[in-house]
Image: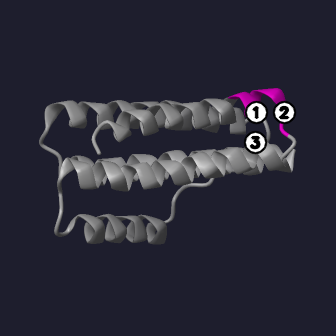
Amino acid sequence: MDNNINALNEINKGCLMGIESLEIILKKIEEPTFKELLEKQINEYQDISIRTDELYREYTNKDIDKTTTMEKAMLWTGIEKDTLLDTSITNIADLLIRGTNMGIVEGRKILNNKTLDKKVHKLCKEYEKMQEKYLDKLKEYL
């Protein structure tokens, strides 16, 4: 059961970090098609986060892990540093690709190294597939 709780916590934190980073970056984007892509990605992260939280309730009454203020501050600082001199779509797509790859790696580690219940495994796969889909779409902007 701990594997399921840990996996759901990790997925949720990944979704929340993805949402947070995309919301920061959206403020820097003016190109409508790219902006729309990022908004769709936020919506999919939100959907998975909600479903993760609901599934989490089947395992424990505790609150699911959220991102801390320190994690948010570090994320904001990193994005600001990486976009200070270059807010081009190419640079931002590169930044998002790196972040998305981190999420894919974490999702794959969960799937490869934990014994999970069927529902949790399925949600982990959805999380990974969603990120792979956006990874491919982001590559078009390099």
First reached walking from the N terminus: tag 2 or tag 3 = 3
First reached walking from the N terminus: tag 1 or tag 3 = 3
**Are discs 1 and 3 less than 8 Å apart at CB?**
yes
Q: Quadrant of the C terminus?
A: top left
Residue drawn where x is 84% and y is 33% of the image: 117
Q: Which residues are magenta?
A: 116-122
**Are discs 1 and 2 less than 8 Å apart at CB?**
yes
Residue drawn where x is 61% and y is 29% of the image: 126
Q: What residue sits right under mark 3 in the picture?
A: 111
Q: Is residue 33 visible?
A: yes
Q: Is residue 141 left or right of residue 51?
A: left
Q: Quadrant of the N terminus?
A: top right
- Residue 64 locus on image (x, y percent): 64, 49
Secondary element under disc 3, as helix, strand or loop, is: helix
Q: What residue sits right under mark 1 in the picture?
A: 121
Residue drawn where x is 64% and y is 52% of the image: 106
When asked about the image quadrant of residue 49, the answer is top right
- Residue 67 locus on image (x, y percent): 51, 59
Disc nearest the viewer among 1 and 3: 3
Residue drawn where x is 30% and y is 32% of the image: 37
Q: What residue sits right under mark 2 in the picture?
A: 117
Per the model, the C-alpha gap separating discs 2 and 3 is 11 Å
Q: Is residue 60 visible?
A: no
User: What kind of residue is marked 2?
Assistant: Asp
Secondary element under disc 2, as helix, strand or loop, is: loop
**Are discs 2 and 3 less than 8 Å apart at CB?**
no
User: What kind of residue is marked 3?
Assistant: Leu
- Residue 42 locus on image (x, y percent): 38, 37
Helix, strand or loop for the magenta stretch, by majority? helix
